[in-house]
Amino acid sequence: MKVTAVSATQSDVPVTGEWVGTLDGYVNAQIQPQANGYLIRQDYREGSQVQEGQVLFEIDPRPFDAALEQAQGQLGQAQAQLALAQINVNRDTPLAEAHAIAQSQLDNEVQQKAQAEAAVKTAEAQVATANINLGFTKVRSLITGVAGQATTQVGNLVSTQSVLTSVSQLNPIKVYFSISDSEYLALTTQAGSDLLHGASKIPLTLILSNGEVYPQKGHVVFVDRQLNAQTGAIRIAAAFPNPGNILRPGQFGRVRAETEVLRKAILVPQAAVNEFQGQEQVYTVAANNTVHVNNVALGTQYGNYWVVTSGLNGGTLVITDNVQKLREGVPVMPEVSKSGAAVSQSAQSGGR
C-alpha cells in the first residue's frame, strides 16, 4: 500500500491560553451635582467626547446668587465694624499714654478690634463658600472621555445624590478576564513565565465577538488581590490602546496570551492521529517498511498539528493517510512529504 509519511519534528512550541473578557472604561466617573436645585440646561451631546472641566449641566443659580449677595453684605458690615474699631484704637492710644483716659477703655477698644477682625474673616469665609456653591450650579466633567446618556431631564429637581450621567475614558480601554486558581498557580510558579509579574514583556491579543483579531496589542495592568471564593477564579485587568474609541464598555471578547514555550516538542499532523477504543494512536514506518502502531499521549494543539508528550520519538516517519486501513506489521510503500520541515520553520518563527 502506498502511504504518505512525514517526519515527526521537534520544535519549540508556544502554548497559548485564552479567556473570555469583558470590556470596560479605563476610568469611569459618575457625574453627580454638588448642589440641590432645578436642572435648567444640558450643555453636552450624549455619546460625545467631553473634556475635563467641561460644563455638562447647569442648575438654577438664583438661590445661590442671593446667598452670595447676602454673604457679601455681611462681609461689608463686618469690615465697617473693623474700620470703626481701628479708628477708636488709633484715637485713644495716645490719650491712654498721656493718662487722659483710663487704660481699661483702650483695652476694651483693642478687644473690640480683634473681635471685628475675626468677624471679617468669618464673613470672608462665608463669601468664599457662597462662591463655591454658586460654582457648583455648573456641573462639570472630572475626566476626559465619552459622556453617556443623561439619566435626568431638564426641569427635574436634582440633589447631591442624583446621578446625572457617566463619563468613561476609553483610550486605553480595560478588558477584565478571570483565570482559575490552578492556572494562576501555574503561571506564578512556572519557570520563565512573566505574564503576571512582568506583564509588559508578554503582549496580549484580543479577539472580538465577530472573530476578528484586534490589531492593537495589550498588556496586563493588575491582578486582583484575592480569589473569588464562589467562582474559584482570580480577576485580571488588561489595557488595550483604543484610538478612535472603537471599543466600548460592555463588549465581550477573548483574550489570548502566550503562557509557556514547550522546548523541543514533538509535532505530528492531526491527520496522523487515530483513536482506537479511547486510545490515541500514531502509525509509523518501521525499518523494514512495515507499519508499527504507537500508543501516544497528546498535549496541546498547535495549528494543524498535535504535540505528542509520550509514545513517539522525534524524527520517526509518521503515516498521514489511509490510517483507517492500516494494521500492525502491514507492509507499505512510504512517500516522504516535506511538510514536517515546514512546521519546524513555522514553530521557530513563532507559529500561529
Image (cartoon, helix red, strand yellow):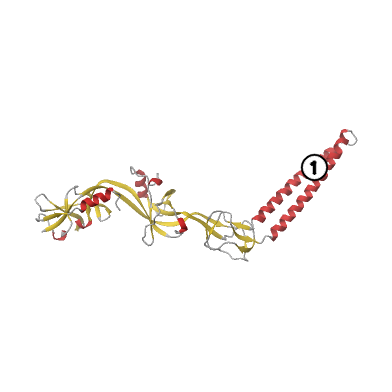
Residue at the (17%, 59%) spot, across then down: 321
**What is the residue that sits farthest to the top in this orientation?**
98
Q: Answer with left or right where residue 209 lies relative to residue 89.
A: left
Q: Label 1 amino acid?
A: Lys
Q: Position of residue 115 (x, y in %)?
A: 78, 43
**In the picture provided, is 53 more to the left or to the right than 188?**
right
Asked whether 121 or 83 is in front, the reply is: 83
**Of 240 and 34, the residue lying toward us:** 240
Can I make out residue 273 in this image?
A: no
Q: Considering the numbered disc 1 on the image, is that residue within a helix, a strand or a loop?
A: helix
Could you tell me residue 345's position as x and y percent? 25, 49
Q: In the current view of this chain or complex, which residue is farthest to the right?
A: 100
348 or 271, which lies in front? 348
Query: Is residue 169 placed above or below 150 in the rendered structure?
Result: above
Residue shown at 81% from the left, 47% from the top: 81
Q: Quadrant of residue 324?
A: bottom left
Judged left or right of residue 214, residue 268 is left
Please state if 174 lies on the left or on the right of 142 as rendered: left
Which quadrant of the figure has residue 44?
bottom right
The image quadrant of residue 154 is bottom right
Whole-percent x and y of residue 304?
25, 56
Q: Position of residue 211 (x, y in %)?
A: 36, 61
Question: Pointer 1: residues within 10 angstroms few (<14), some, or many (20+)?
Answer: many
Regarding residue 63, the answer to whether it shows in the image is: yes
Tally of numbered tags:
1
User: Residue at label 1?
Assistant: 113
Residue at coordinates 25% horizontally, 47% vertically from top-left?
A: 11
